[in-house]
């Protein structure tokens, strides 16, 4: 039976981004296309949740404009559901907001980054060498959960990539953000309170190479091996992070 990934969508695209890219779940369907998965999306931002962790073989929590520190009831409900998934040994991948919600659900803390907004292509050091991913965040993990291993970091984000054994994998950056998407996001948010010089630097950073395809393969491999399924992956750029 085909491995089913449940996408827990923590926000919606709006305006021209929604017209061009549909929604956050669609971005993940695109980067994980070709690995043999099937998908179902639950818009948890609208308080629409699965009944049980058993509703999918694995789970992916998307990014969001919201902060995990916000008081919205759906955020607390999402933390609870993530804990249920971990307790039921259903594998979870978290991206940006999802990276942070995993951390707070499992005993860590999140706070605004000391350096403020982090946008554009970032270099992250892993045990297998540097990787390059698009980022867009203001908050980040400030205290690790007890069982987390750091598998990637940058100068400004010390807990940028985490592993929780066979249970979960998470990234502060956005492997699902293509350069075209990030460029459009910069244009969409140019009047949203982020310094224009920072946005200009973010646009210029897109000339650097990207590791998003390798990270997509890492995520696909995690989901398959977490269920003891022999991976059959088509990408030639497979990569995985190692503990420092």
Image (spheres, grey):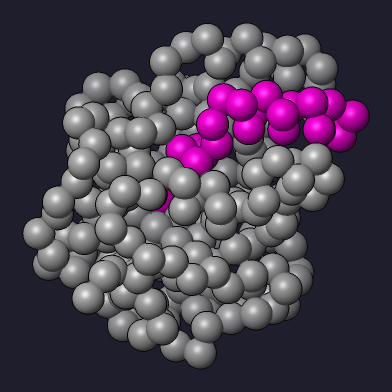
Q: Residue at x 34, y 38 (%)?
A: 215
Q: 99 or 224, which lies in front?
A: 224
The quadrant in which residue 235 appears is top left
Residue 31 vertical position relative to residue 92 in the rendered view, above or below:
above
Q: Position of residue 124 (x, y in %)?
A: 39, 26
Instruction: Please name whichever residue, 244 or 65, is drawn nearer the observer in this view of the structure.
Output: 65
Q: Judge whether residue 91 is colored magenta.
A: no
**What are the residue bounds of the magenta stretch?**
170-192
Is residue 137 or residue 59 the one in the foreground?
Answer: 59
Q: Is residue 231 left or right of residue 130?
A: left
As displayed, is residue 116 above or below residue 87? above
Residue furthest to the bottom:
51
| Membership of 186 in magenta stretch | yes
Q: Residue at x 39, y 58 (%)?
A: 93
* Relative horizontal placement of residue 230, taking residue 13 as reference (left or right): left
84 to 216, vertically: above or below = below
Give percent across and percent down for residue 2: 26, 70
On the question of residue 47 being in view, the answer is yes
Instruction: Name the residue nearer the viewer: 199 or 209.
Output: 209
Q: Confirm whether residue 110 shows in the render.
A: no
Return the x and y of residue 134 as percentages of the image width and height.
Answer: 53, 29
Quadrant where the C terminus lies?
top left
Location of residue 174 with respect to 230 vertically, above or below: above
Which residue sits at x=69%, y=58%?
11
The percent position of residue 171, horizontal first and vertical second, equals 43, 45
Q: Residue at x 33, y 61 (%)?
A: 37
Quadrant in the picture for the N terminus = bottom left
């Amino acid at each position: 039976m085909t491995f089913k990934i449940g996408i827990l969508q923590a926000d919606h695209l709006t305006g021209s981004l929604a017209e061009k890219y549909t929604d956050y779940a669609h971005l993940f369907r695109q980067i994980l296309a070709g690995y043999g998965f099937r998908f179902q999306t639950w818009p948890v931002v609208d308080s629409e949740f699965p009944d049980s962790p058993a509703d999918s073989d694995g789970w992916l929590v998307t990014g969001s404009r919201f902060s995990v520190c916000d008081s919205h009831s759906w955020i607390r409900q999402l933390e609870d559901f993530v804990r249920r998934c971990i307790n039921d040994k259903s594998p979870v991948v978290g991206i940006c907001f999802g990276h942070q919600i995993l951390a707070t659900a499992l005993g860590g803390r999140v706070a605004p980054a000391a350096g403020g907004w982090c946008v554009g292509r970032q270099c992250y050091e892993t045990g297998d060498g540097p990787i390059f991913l698009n980022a867009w965040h203001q908050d980040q993990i400030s205290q690790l959960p007890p069982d987390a291993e750091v598998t990637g970091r940058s100068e400004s984000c010390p807990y940028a990539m985490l592993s929780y054994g066979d249970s979960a994998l998470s990234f502060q950056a956005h492997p699902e953000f293509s350069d075209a998407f990030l460029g459009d996001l910069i244009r969409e948010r140019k009047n949203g309170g982020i310094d224009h010089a920072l946005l200009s630097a973010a646009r210029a950073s897109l000339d650097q190479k990207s590791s998003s395809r390798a990270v997509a393969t890492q995520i696909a491999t995690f989901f398959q091996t977490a269920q003891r399924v022999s991976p059959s992956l088509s990408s030639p750029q497979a990569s995985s992070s190692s503990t420092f």
